[in-house]
Amino acid sequence: MATLAALPLLLVLAWTVIYPNAAVIAGSFGHWIEFAQSPSDVEALKNSLIIAVASVVAALAIGVPLAFLLTRFDFPGRTLLRAAALLPAALPPLVGVISFLFLYGDTGVITRLTQIVFRLQDVPWHLNGIGAIVFIHAYTMYVYVYLFVSAGLERYESSLDEAAIGLGASTFRRLTRVTLPLLTPAIAGSALLVFMSALGSFSAPYVFGGGVRVLSTQILNSKLNDAIGLAYVETTVLAISAVAGLLLFRWLEGKRAYVTPGKGGVIRNPVRSRWVRMALAFSAGLIVLVLVLPHLMIILVSFAKDGAWTTQVLPPEYTTHNYAGLFTENQLWTPIRNSIVMSVLATAANVVFCVAGAYLIVTRKFSGRRLLEILVALPWAIPGTAVALGLLATFNTNNLAVGKVLLVGTFWILPLAYFVRNIPLVSQAVEGSLRQMDLSLEPAARGLGASWWMAVRRVVLPAARPGIVAGALLASVTAVGEFVASIVLYTHGNRPISIEILAQLRSYAFGTASAYSALLIGLVLIMALGARIAESRMQ
Amino acid sequence: MDEILGFPHQEAQLSGTGEGLVVDGIVRSFGEQTAVDHVSFEVKPGELVALVGASGSGKTTTLRIVAGYEQPDAGRVLFAGRDITRLGPSKRGFGMVFQHYALFPHMSVLDNVAFGLEARGIGRAERRQRAGAALDQVGLAGKGARMVQQLSGGEQQRVALARAGVIEPRLLLLDEPLSNLDPTLRQSTRDELRTTLKRSKAPALFVTHDQDDAFAIADRIVLLSLGRVLQTGSPEDLYDRPATRDVAMFIGHATLIPARRNGDSANVTIDGVSRPLVLSSSGDVADGASGAIVLRPEAVEITRDDSTGQWPATVLSRRFAGAQFVYRVRLDSQIVFDVASGDRIEAGQAVGVRVTRPVPMVP
């Protein structure tokens, strides 16, 4: 019975997740030698892996110490730093890249200030190449590490550290032999997230990669050059790398998962030394400034008059016209309307689909359940560019005999891409809510004479609501700012905000690009706040 | 010693001879709440001392201050005549057994026990040999390669003990060492623990909320309540010569009955019948002053004949307790208590109650 109910869900997943990936792999045959013999492709694979690993190292180097500092110690400025530490997560991918361009690019504010202060002939650095990409990855992705390790430290049983100290261990020995080994699951889990995001990252290499080739940008290039077969090989290689990383980190994560006795809980030590307190407070202030600068920069430039900012450190002329223009000029309003409409459509589909899936996964046992579980999580392991190429390979022609429908070039291809990319996110949120529900509630309602629909409506859905709300908010916000799949699949008619930001940037309309960006940041903050409220109701 | 017993907040006479642990008037507050309020006691070489009290009595905070994990707001901790109040826990050379044992879950049993030796820079071969010997001593020979989670609760407790003992600590600290064991195991572990601790020669200070644990293991007991020391003494001292009502109520099942001291005895009036009772101790009740006698079940006999020196009573209920029955009897409207007896008596029956041995008196 449940298998029958799950069948439509499995069919949708087969059509939108399995078939596209299979089509990409099938399309890649015959082009592998081409890939292996292309120096730029081999270099792209190498660069992608280097960037992914370097981003993991950089994110760990920032995130782990910050988590220790904020959970274990008390010092002036701690609360402020704790709030600011999450700010990079509020930057949609492309927006983060643009703000870094304004700050640290050749004509960026910080770059020019440094040049002036130190009276340099040339710009002190160039924001391009692998270093620049890893730099912005470190900024946006350390948040995963910080969040995971903080949570690990909150649960950490502090008597283990005390036991190590009492047995005479030095601080270094305690950290390396006891604390860090026991935090391995948290560290590996967050490193996995960073690895996957960095490997699939598109915006940073695309905007200021300079001459650096990576797989994700290489895919788009091949597609634009009509070398679609080669694009399929590149996509397959990218997806395989991602899955390999996934398996490696999951193995690390599981290897060291221990249950510790006791109740955990953190004892936050006030920092006693006056000098250390002052140094910490000062550094905290500095870090907060660095974290908040990209946001401030976007807001500042969003009020700058387009075209007026040339050689000055800060934009010389300000106006509110950039914002007014977004809502009054048809050309500028269309992308906003497109993004909102497509996001709402995709999210609505996500909610219906994922609630049904989560309901079956959590409350029913049936053959195919494990398959359904894997398939709803699968798109998470596939980089956005690869998802887009898969859809391109599947929905490129009308041929129902082989399961193909022409959606590429129509409005509908982007909502479909957003839907596929957000299936794991929404499913996980709804499943999380449902798993907290007592599984005997639904049978109890049925036992009292309720119909199936009444039991679902009055018992199951209310239990799932916090997860539905949180999942829907996060999904819609991701879809509104989506860039990676959009740039592969958009047409002029359904171009979303991110594509328009890029277009404005190319025509040096920094103010308008920033106004769009500020709009996205505002949306993200509002939705994230809503999701957090929904989640807190869950507990 | 007797004079200083019974003064709950006295300045303890500390030997300060330079041996063992001396805790001298320590105070520790958390916000508004004073968890430890001028606590003083000592642990002499080779001695087993129990810190006993209900939850919130400050016993764990006191232990953590001795271990060095907490700093007192006032007062001093001395060991071997040296002030160690500000010394870090890793430098004290004490061994600690944590309440949940705090065994490192990612290490084998042997690596857990060897950790303290590793921290002292002892070479691998010697480390393994000494840790193995320590495991033998607690009856875990051959289990060194196991992971901690594969052991039972009782075995984990012994690993924790071996880990704390293998570094040859100058003082052993144990936080509720028996609280995670199930009741049957707990009985047998008590004797085992005392034997192990006595054999190690190191003095030990352990925290427990269970007076049976303290009685079975400790040479001396420090009884704490609301952060203050109520009384310090041997288990017999606390049981037979409680200094205050609080001590009497905490130790054993006691009923307090108003009385007036008259030399070595006390006059007790129940239901208009006044009788003298011989006192085993008088706390600091002055001759002629009033206080209360401490009546425990084993000092009372229930009779059905009409012999002299007894009070009339009524049996309220009977409970079967294996070797004997426990009767709840009422002497008058105020005084109801339990008496054990081998006789079978029905509820509602009128009986006599007689005190058969000297009783303690408290103010």
Image (cartoon, coloured by chain):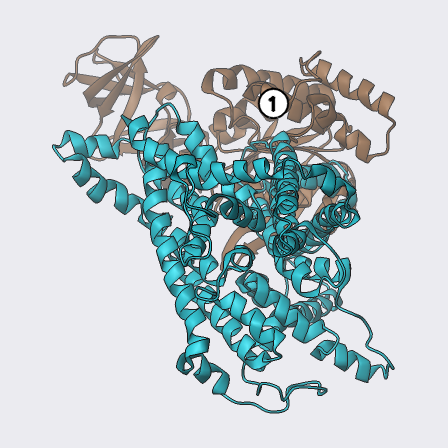
Q: Is residue B307 visible?
A: yes
- Between A401 and A148, the residue placed more toward the observer is A401
The colour one sees for chain A in the rendered image is cyan
User: What kind of residue is marked 1?
Assistant: Gln
Quarter of the image where one finds residue A8: top left
The colour one sees for chain B in the rendered image is brown
Q: Is residue B6 visible?
A: no
Residue B130 position within the rendered picture, expressed as x and y whole percent measured from the top left = 80, 20
In which chain is the residue bearing label 1?
B
Quarter of the image where one finds residue A400: top left
The residue where tag 1 is placed is: B156
Residue A308 position within the rendered picture, expressed as x and y whole percent measured from the top left = 63, 89
Identify the residue at the far bottom of this view: A317
- Between A426 and A485, the residue placed more toward the observer is A485
- Quadrant showing the N terminus of chain A: top left
Question: Image check: A257 left or right of B314?
Answer: right
Residue A289 position within the rendered picture, expressed as x and y whole percent measured from the top left = 64, 72
Identify the residue at the far left of this view: A449
Position above or below: B186 against A299? above
- At mark 1, the secondary structure is helix
- Between A69 and A263, the residue placed more toward the observer is A69
Q: Residue at x 51, y 28 (%)?
A: B179
Question: Image check: B230 left or right of A207?
Answer: left
- Between A225 and A56, the residue placed more toward the observer is A225
Quarter of the image where one finds residue A66: bottom right
Q: Residue at x 42, y 32 (%)?
A: A372
Position above or below: B124 against A386? above
Position above or below: B16 against B168? below
Q: Residues within 10 Å of mark 1 (few under 14, many from 20)?
A: many
Q: Residue at x 58, y 16 (%)?
A: B191
Residue A359 position within the rendered picture, expressed as x and y whole percent measured from the top left = 32, 37
